[in-house]
Image (cartoon, rainbow, N blue to C red):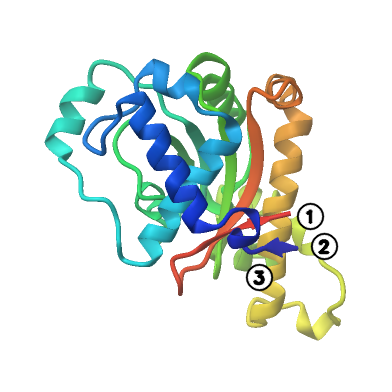
């Protein structure tokens, strides 16, 4: 189900492309995108830029930035290039994972990276009104919410949240009943991927705004997963 990010675009090409784009837009690492800079990006270029940033992060080569300058500049307005729906997990610092900074991306967080009305409304604002070019649902390895859904955990309002992940649990085949547990890492990882796949489908199915933007080529909607052990992001087909 997963495809290695190098299959999508080589790091070298993506890095060169990002560098050329920044030069053309007069952008530097200490400043957020301008409106013109945001508009100049295509959805594919935004994805390539994020994947290149993740390669830098995973390699320990994150960009050095003047955060004080970023704070001052971003206070004048925001023109992020992407909106990312991530899990609540504290080990997935989304901006750091993609080597971006203040004003670069919108981030929505909820346990299990589930889609709901609030998240969809936020995505619609980020794209249709604020100009973001990419929507990403980002899962991660060893997801506690997914494990809870597998185990049928119940706790207050968490019970209803985990129920939204349950279709992904039921959708994974090829495991015997005794293998379908949260202690089976292979099963857990497949459910994580299936959940991302399901949530991407829900974005398209439950938001005509986002579906129409994608169909017209104005945005791209993708799924991905972050590996806690390597720091790398892989796209999910």
In this view, the residue in front, 227 or 28, is 28
Q: Which mark is residue 189?
A: 3
Give the crowd class for mark 3: few <14, some 14-19, many >=20 residues within 10 Å. Answer: some
Whether residue 104 appears in this view of the structure is no
Residue 139 point in image, percent of width and height = 57, 56
Image point (75%, 48%), residue name: 198
> From the viewer's perspective, is residue 94 above or below residue 214?
below
Give the crowd class for mark 1: few <14, some 14-19, many >=20 residues within 10 Å. Answer: some
* Cα separation between marks 3 and 1: 15 Å
Q: Earlier in the sequence, mark 3 or mark 2?
A: 2
Quadrant in the picture for residue 100: top left
Q: Earlier in the sequence, mark 3 or mark 1?
A: 1
- Determine contact: label 1, label 2, CB under 8 Å: yes
Image point (36%, 33%), residue name: 22
> From the viewer's perspective, is residue 218 above or below residue 15?
above
Residue 201 point in image, percent of width and height = 76, 41
* Cα separation between marks 3 and 2: 14 Å
Residue placed under numbered mark 2 in the picture: 170
In this view, the residue in front, 157 or 101, is 101
Q: Callout 3: helix, strand or loop?
A: helix
Q: Quadrant of the C terminus?
A: bottom right
């Amino acid at each position: 189900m997963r495809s290695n990010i190098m299959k999508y675009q080589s790091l070298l090409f993506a890095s060169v492309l990002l560098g050329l784009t920044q030069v053309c837009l007069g952008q530097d690492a200490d400043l957020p995108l301008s409106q013109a800079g945001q508009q100049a990006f295509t959805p594919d270029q935004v994805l390539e830029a994020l994947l290149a940033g993740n390669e830098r992060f995973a390699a320990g080569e994150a960009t050095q930035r003047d955060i004080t300058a970023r704070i001052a500049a971003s206070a004048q307005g925001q023109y992020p290039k992407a909106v990312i729906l991530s899990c609540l997990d504290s080990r997935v610092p989304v901006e750091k994972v993609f080597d971006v900074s203040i004003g670069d991306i919108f981030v929505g967080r909820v346990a299990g990276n589930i889609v709901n009305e609030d998240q969809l409304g936020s995505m619609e604002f980020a794209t249709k009104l604020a100009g973001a070019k990419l929507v990403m649902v980002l899962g991660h390895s060893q997801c506690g919410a997914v494990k809870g859904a597998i185990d049928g955990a119940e706790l207050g309002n968490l019970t209803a949240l985990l129920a939204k992940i349950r279709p992904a649990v039921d959708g994974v085949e090829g495991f015997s009943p005794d293998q379908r547990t949260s202690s089976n890492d292979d099963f857990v990882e497949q459910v994580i991927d299936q959940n991302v796949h399901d949530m991407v489908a829900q974005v398209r199915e439950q938001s005509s705004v986002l579906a129409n933007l994608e169909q017209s080529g104005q945005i791209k909607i993708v799924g991905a997963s972050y590996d806690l052990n390597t720091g790398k992001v892989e796209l999910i087909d």
